[in-house]
Amino acid sequence: MVARILTIVGHSMEPTIRNKQRVVLLNYPFLKYKVGHIVAFRYKGKIFVKRIVNIENGLFVLAGDNVSSTYDSQHFGPLSKNTFIGRVFV
């Protein structure tokens, strides 16, 4: 298992996770992802943190909790598990 600390930059997960808040990122080979989990993933060379809101045909639909300030699956579409870095714990 790999654990590390991430510092969140941005407001897209407020009120659950605030800007500059530290969170724990866990990853291990057999980690299961479910609707409601918060995940960190890579997209276009950047790391994002979003909530899984739906799983369609093995692809994950991700959304920020702050709907007025988020860049999520509405913009980039559903993503595969291969883009995930791990699960985020507040």
Image (cartoon, rainbow, N blue to C red):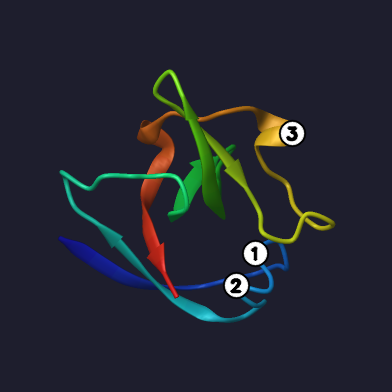
- In the rendered structure, the answer to whether residue 68 lies left or right of residue 66 reads right
Do tag 2 and tag 3 residues touch (Cβ < 8 Å)?
no
Q: Pointers 2 and 1 in contact (CB under 8 A)?
A: yes
Q: Which mark is residue 49?
A: none
The residue under label 2 is 16
Q: Quadrant of the N terminus?
A: bottom left
Number of other residues with Cα within 10 Å of mark 3, as a class: few under 14, some 14 to 19, many 20 or more:
few
Q: Secondary structure at mark 3?
A: helix
Of the residues tagged 2 and 3, which is closer to the observer? Answer: 2
Image point (56%, 28%), residue name? 78
Query: Label 2 to label 1, Cα distance in Å?
Result: 6 Å
User: Where on the picture, by quarter, is residue 84?
Assistant: top left
The image shows residue 13 at horizontal and vertical percentages of 65, 64
- Element at badge 2? loop
Q: Position of residue 69 (x, y in %)?
A: 81, 58
Query: Residue lying farthest right?
Result: 68
Residue 43 location, x and y as percent? 56, 39
Q: Which residue is found at the position 51% from the left and 30% from the top?
A: 79
User: Residue at point 58% right, 71% down?
Assistant: 8
> Which residue is farthest bottom?
21
The amino acid beneath tag 1 is Met
- Asked whether residue 21 appears in the rendered view, the answer is yes
**Residue named by callout 1:** 13
Within-10-Å neighbours for mark 1: few <14, some 14–19, many 20+:
many
